[in-house]
Amino acid sequence: MQGNRSFRVSNELKKEISCILKQSIRDPRLDCLITISEIDVSKDLSYAKVFVTFIQDNINEYEDKKKIKEILKILKNASGYIRFLISKRLNMRIIPFLSFYYDDSFFKGYKISKIIDNAINE
């Protein structure tokens, strides 16, 4: 369980990074909706693991490992710029270094739901 301070910082970071990804990151290779599912901030607030999910028009795209790696690489390359924008928006002494990770829990849940629906229908 995160401490109260870490929890507050992760919530603020989640809001700000979401806004930044929607408004300020203009990369044509990011042709999907990027959703932040969770942010895990270290105790000293110097590092943050950002767990993201990508939703595209075609639901089967999540299985494309190459596309996932490409998007994570783009986000990694943009992390310095994202940190810069966060420093402008938030009054924090330390802006954490950002690491992006793919969170596939949404799609695992989707697969399980489909299996259950198929079992009920049969």
Image (cartoon, grey):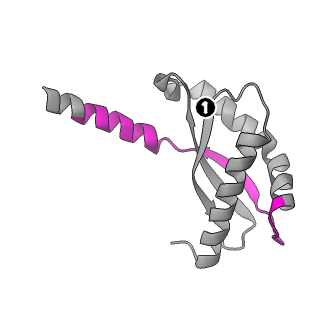
Q: Secondary structure at mark 1?
A: helix
Q: Give the residues in magenta.
A: 89-116
Q: As rendered, which of 95 and 87 lies closer to the eye?
A: 87
Residue at position x 65%, y 55% from top? Answer: 49
Horizontal side, residue 46 vs residue 4: left or right? right
On the image, the x and y values in percent for residue 18 come to 67, 49
Identify the image quadrant of the C terminus: top left
Task: Give how far across and how far down residue 81 sits, in percent.
Answer: 85, 47
Q: Is residue 31 magenta?
A: no
Residue 23 falls in image quadrant: top right
- The answer to whether one can see residue 57 in this image is yes
Left or right, residue 117 beside residue 91: left
> Can residue 99 be seen at all in this image of the molecule?
no
Label 1 belongs to which residue?
68
Residue in the image at 78% along x and 38% along y: 25
Q: Which amino acid lies under the numbered mark 1 shown in the image of this protein?
A: Ile
Check the image and report above or below for 81 versus 3. above
Residue under the point 71% across and 51% down = 17
Q: State left or right for residue 49 relative to residue 119.
A: right
**Is residue 105 magenta-colored?**
yes
**Quadrant of the image occupied by residue 43:** bottom right
